[in-house]
Amino acid sequence: MTDFSAIDYKNPKNPFEELIHYGILRESGRYPWGSGENPHQRNKGFLDYVSKLEKDGLTPVEIAKGLDISTTQLRAAKSVAKNQQKAAQLTQIKEMRDKGMSNIAIGARLGLPESQVRALLKPTAQAKTARLQNTVDMLKSQVDKHDYLDIGTGVEHYVGISRGQLLNAVAQMEEEGYKRQYVKVKQLGTGKDTTVMVLVKEDVPYSEIYRNSEKIGTIAVYSGDKGKTFNELQKPRNISSDRIEVRYGPDGGAAMDGVIQVRRGVEDLQMGNAKYAQVRIAVDGTHYLKGMAMYADDLPDGVDIRFNTNKEDKGDKLKAMKPQKSDDETNPFGTVIRQLPYTDSKGNTQISAMNIVNSEGVWGEWSKSISTQMLSKQPKALAEQQLAISLEAKQREFDEVMQLTNPSVKKRLLQGLADDLDSSAVHLKAAALPRQSTQVILPINSLKDNEVFAPNYRDGEKVVLVRYPHGGIFEIPELTVNNRNREARSVIHQAKDAIGINSNVASRLSGADFDGDTVLVIPNNNGAIKTKPALEGLKNFDPQERYPYYDGMKVMSARTKQIQMGAVSNLITDMTIRKANDTELAAAVRHSMVVIDAEKHKLNWTQSAKDNGISALRKKYQERADKDSPGASTLISRATSPMDVENRRAARVSEGGPIDPETGKLNWVPTGESYVVPAHTRVTTTGKTVHIPEKTVVKTFKAAQLAETSDARTLSSGQPIEEVYATYSNRLKSMANEARKEMLTIKPTPMSPTAKRTYAAEVDKFNADLRLAARNAPLERKAQLVANAIVKAKQDSNPDMDGDQLKKVRNLAQREARYRLGAQKVDIPISDRQWSAIQAGAVSPNILNQILERTDLDRVKELATPRVKQGMTPGMVARARSMMANGYTQSEIAAQLGISTSTLNAAL
């Protein structure tokens, strides 16, 4: 043991030279610190040594510099030393307790106060030490698995532990011979380098990691309890098909199509605390079940799962299931899943066969706005009312931003607001109706055709259900809430975001099934939402029966389905707005029902188009003078329909600038880019060979039609409901232009050297946070590149993917890439003191803009808004009274108007 009392602490040279030779801890920098025989003594000596230096006035920076390590490594070393010392002490204490010694006697033997002995024996202290060792063990196993392990910033979020806990574990591993290396990896496309922090074993040289940078692995485990346990995404548990009963269509499966009924209390079929969940269940190692799982109490002996399907073939039950994908043995389902670990009856950790896609409580968080697809088919007055609420909310937000006192913040928020207004002017979504919510549907076939079990709504009240794609008011059932139904109460009582309906109601909802389909539930006690009985021409219509597959028929591809569904949805919208009769609407809706199932069930959709006269309906309701062939013809259908626009860029200052100072509109300049299509020949469907000469083609991109016009009325066919939406869109566009004009007038606050000195600590914190964010930026860029490569490979192998499939692939790829690279969104917090620093000009406009790009803008708006008590304008009072008359609660009105309920009550 080193005699630290003999060291001259006032002379940094002596202690560091002594420390190098006596080896308090192992360090992977310039010197491997030695290895004394008693690690407990070494840790105590190191802590005493650092404490003495701190008492003598040395800063952590000076101590770390003398040890040739960073301050981060110093903090980690201290933490490791403390934990190892505590672990060693705890071992000794437990041994002495086993011999019958009291806490006082143990303290006297170890030189510790009795209170410290007691503290070390507390479960919380033991758990903290155990979590560190668990993290170390996890990292070792991951290094063994990958050889080169990414431990860069952000990894800890995916693992479920703190950054400090991860680095402390890494520091302990460095004592044991592991190394961390910083490897520069070239980004594809940008040519820039991304620095990745990598953990490796001691004998792995930097050159090897660099040569094998594409093999750098990520920590593929997650801890739900902050490091007590770690769960790796495992090969899913497979259920034997012997435990599964398939209930086919004729036997009742059609009435519950997509539902997986599960026996209660079966150990390996747990859903956590959820009553229902959208799941995937692996079967026999070759197939899987997909659908909504819910508990059932009527399963026959020997059956733990009943899968309901509308299929009629009662042959091999596996044919009713989907084949597992062979390219990923840990996730053979092709969608994002979450596994549920549990402790079995023997005390072993297992994973449930229920691989969760969505679970109870998720659906209720989905968007609650109302799309044009539904609202444009309702009375004009209702659309005007909901769009007015949306517009007033946007105007209020604009007014609030204009009150902000900090120029840079005001400019940043105006930019974000302008972008949001431009988007809203195209998508045309309206404010939600009172108590509207998204709910997942589950089958309760004991309910009547006019009933719904909806535990989040009042028993006896009227509600309507709306499902997308939405054909018309004839697809909106109005139901009475019956929360007394015995069957429903036994399976989804107090459900957070589910309702129960019978199969007849589901079939009216655009042919919904029960594998995770959702609906908008809207109270309709005042009858504001109009509905009508199902169209006569849709009764008893079965697409699979009417348009079955025939030998040699070309089956619709996923991409064709996407195109045709968009076309027929627009046709139905235009027909409704232009007052088509019920017979015509029924024909279009029948065809849409065939198209939506044509790929899945191999339906003869081309014959359906002929039988239902789709070509004639398009000519009648979608022909336009400015277009050679029929297509979307009303503002509602044309708004987001794509059009080709020549490639362009923002105008330079010499060209008038990116924003027109007079109008606030965006200025674009064509790039003039083009490409040459070489001469070639092609064979037509009739067998004729055609020669195509070389031609030059101007490069274009797809843009929404409504985004490319300054006046929404240019897309209108002149119907009254279109005028309502055109007025709304134009007002939003005008507001966006106003925001951009205001941006041009704002001058930033110059930095104040005096304020910078006064708020030095706050400025240092900002700079540290920005460095952290900057370190993540290359990881995020690389994650995007990796994700794009994954998506391209998937598209190359499956060029007919539809929009939903492509979106799923992109989400999976992005998640996987971010997980592998440790990329994360870095939010910079702003304290009240830091805000004072900003207001005083302690940071430059450039630094402030970087901060604003990476912080919570709602918090910024709160800090920047003048502390003036806001009342209600006469317009707000009038709007509040109107909303109250239409059934909104006070809390809903207050939320829409951005005020407190007390302010609302005072005004009313």
Image: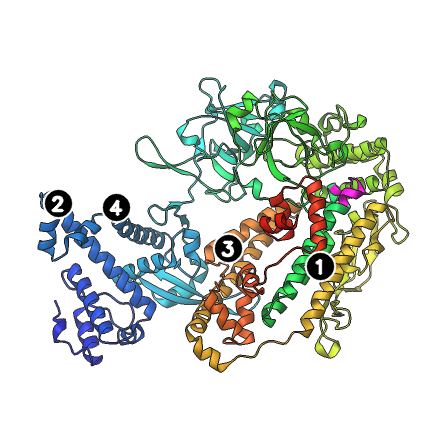
Residue range of the region highlighted in magenta in the rendering: 375-383
Q: From the top left corner, tell me how far across and down residue 528 is, in percent.
A: 74, 37
Q: CA–CA distance between discs 3 and 2? A: 50 Å
N-terminal label among 4 and 2: 2
Instruction: Assess whether residue 149 is covered by the magenta stretch.
Output: no
Disc nearest the viewer among 3 and 2: 2
N-terminal label among 4 and 3: 4
Residue designated by label 2: 97
N-terminal label among 1 and 4: 4
N-terminal label among 1 and 3: 1
Q: From the top left corner, tell me how far across and down residue 34 is, in percent.
A: 19, 67
N-terminal label among 1 and 2: 2
Numbered badge on residue 422: 1
| Few, some or many residues within 10 Å of mark 1 (<14, 14–19, 20+) | many
Of residues 93 and 348, the one drawn nearer to the viewer in this rendering: 93
In this rendering, would 641 be left or right of 219?
A: right
Specify the quadrant that holds the N terminus. bottom left
Secondary structure of the residue carrying tag 1 is: helix
